[in-house]
Each structure stands twice: as structure tokens, then as C-alpha cells.
Amino acid sequence: MAQDPQIPGLEHRPSDSPYVERVYRVEPGAAPAPARMVSVANSNWELIAWTAEGVTTVSVRGPETHPTVVPMGDSMDGAFGVVFSHGAHLRNLPVPALVDSSVDSPHATDRTFVLEGAEWEIPAYGNAETFVERLVRAGLLVRDPLVADVLAGDTPLLVTPRSVQRRVAAATGLTQGTIRQIERARQAAMLLRSGTATADVVHLVGYHDQPHLARSMARFVGRKATELQKPAPDEVLSLLYKTDAQVRP
């Protein structure tokens, strides 16, 4: 379990489920919330539930190919999210339709929400995997294991490159190249935020040169390297973490 000091009350953990990349929660009232959050590009989709001003919303949010700025302030009273692994997707809600978009549950309370016409209990931080297993047993959540293997750098046998590309796009909504670019930018942002020198980040993550890094930060993170190394006091980045996706060219 890890905590991010830049986001008050945030903790997150990896998962041993092949369907889940990470689980996170933001506890209410941990500390004054920053004025805004920069939601950086992300190649995974997620299920997120949050409460603001007494109203709970549950949403399926797709991969994001560009950064967005989200106002925060003191309106949010806690949040919970499940980040799904590459290759996992809802059978009747294809990930390609969710890229840079989201779908809210038509009805949600502080305990339940509606998904695919049925009522589900909102999972907790400690039992997210149980919830995911129920989705799998109900036939709502499926997984293409080849996608995760390919993005981790494995070369599939008896599958043509065109078939691999088609399956990656069907399960993630993105091309392999876009996923690599997004994950490389996220890794670079993590290093810059931790104080790593820009020249070292270029070498560690596999950029051609510093202008290449700068273009990637502008496209996928929305901030310059210097802004990541010395962030504004009233601004935070969205959740960053290391994945198994290959980031080098």
C-alpha cells in the first residue's frame, strides 16, 4: 500500500487479480484539498465512485489521450476507484467507445449503483477483487490475456502482427504505439516529480533528446519538466504508478 503526499488522503495498492491494475481511495477530510488536479493521460480504463456535496456518482471512465484540469477545492467528500488491467473490458461497453469519455451509472446511492441494468454494491478498498470476481462470473467483465502479454514485451506465437494490433485496439481502445507513448510520459513525469534531472530522465525513459521529452510532457501531461520538478502549491497530478507496459521504443 502506498500513499501520495501530493494528494491529501490518497492511498493506493496493486492487485493480484489479472483483471485489476490498481485500487485506490481518497479519504474525506484528510487535509485541505488543492485547488485543482491535472489528470494526465492514462492508457487504462477505470471504475470510480465519488461523493461531492452529499451526492454519490459512479462512472466508468475510459483511457485518456490528453491531460485535463479538474477543479477540486473542498467539494469532494471521498472517492474510490478500480483501475483495470490492459486487456480487461466490459463485454457490453467496449473500451474504444470510452476513449476520452465516460459513462455514469443511471442510478447511484451511497451504497449501490446500476451497471448493465442490475444493481451492484459499491465495493470497498479492501474487497475490490471480490467485486471484480462477481463481474467475471456474471459474464460482464472479460479479458484477452494476449494483450497484457504483448504490452509487457512478449512476442506471441501463431498470431499475426495484424491480429495482435486488432486485439490490442479492441481491448484497450488504443494502439500499441499510443499506449507506449502514454506510459513513457507517465514514467517520465514520476521521475521528474521525484527530482530526477531532465537529462537523466531522457536517458532512463528512452527519449531521443530533451525537446522530444518536452513535446511528450506537453502532449500527455500538460506541464513542462520544470513545472513537474517544482509544482505549484495549489495543484496536484492524478495518480501515477509504474505498470508492466513497455515504455521504450
Image (cartoon, rainbow, N blue to C red):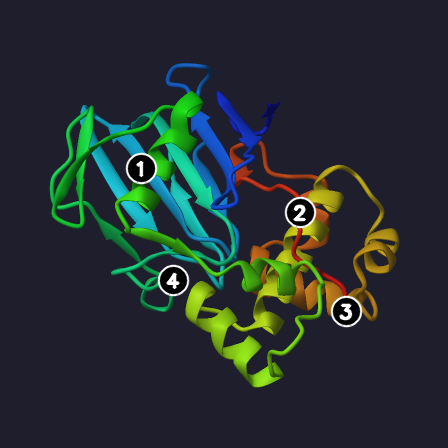
Taking 140 as reference, is 55 left or right? left
* Residue drawn at point x = 56 percent, y = 35 percent: 16
Q: CA distance from mark 1 to mark 4?
A: 27 Å
Which of disc 3 and disc 1 is earlier in sequence? 1
| Amino acid bearing label 1 | Arg
Location of residue 180 by image quarter: bottom right
The residue beneath circle 3 is 211
Please state the horizontal and vertical placement of residue 25, each as a whole percent of the image: 44, 27
10 Å crowding of disc 2: few (<14), some (14-19), many (20+)? few
Residue type at mark 4: give it: Asp
Q: Is residue 226 above or below residue 79?
A: below
Q: Is residue 177 left or right of residue 108?
A: right
Q: Which residue is mark 4?
A: 100
The kind of secondary structure element at disc 3 is: helix
Q: Is residue 93 above or below residue 31?
A: below
Q: Secondary structure at mark 1?
A: helix
Marker disc for residue 227: 2
Residue where numbered disc 1 is placed: 134
Q: Residues within 10 Å of mark 4 (few under 14, many from 20)?
A: some
**Horizontal side of residue 180 vs 129, given as left or right:** right
Q: Amino acid at mark 2?
A: Glu
Mark 1 neighbour density, 10 Å: few (under 14) some (14–19) many (20 or more): few
The amino acid marked with disc number 3 is: Pro
* Residue at (26, 29) in percent of width and height: 122
Going from the N terminus, do you reach mark 2 or mark 1 first? 1
Which residue occupies 62% across, 41% down?
241
In this view of the protein, can residue 19 be seen by the observer?
yes
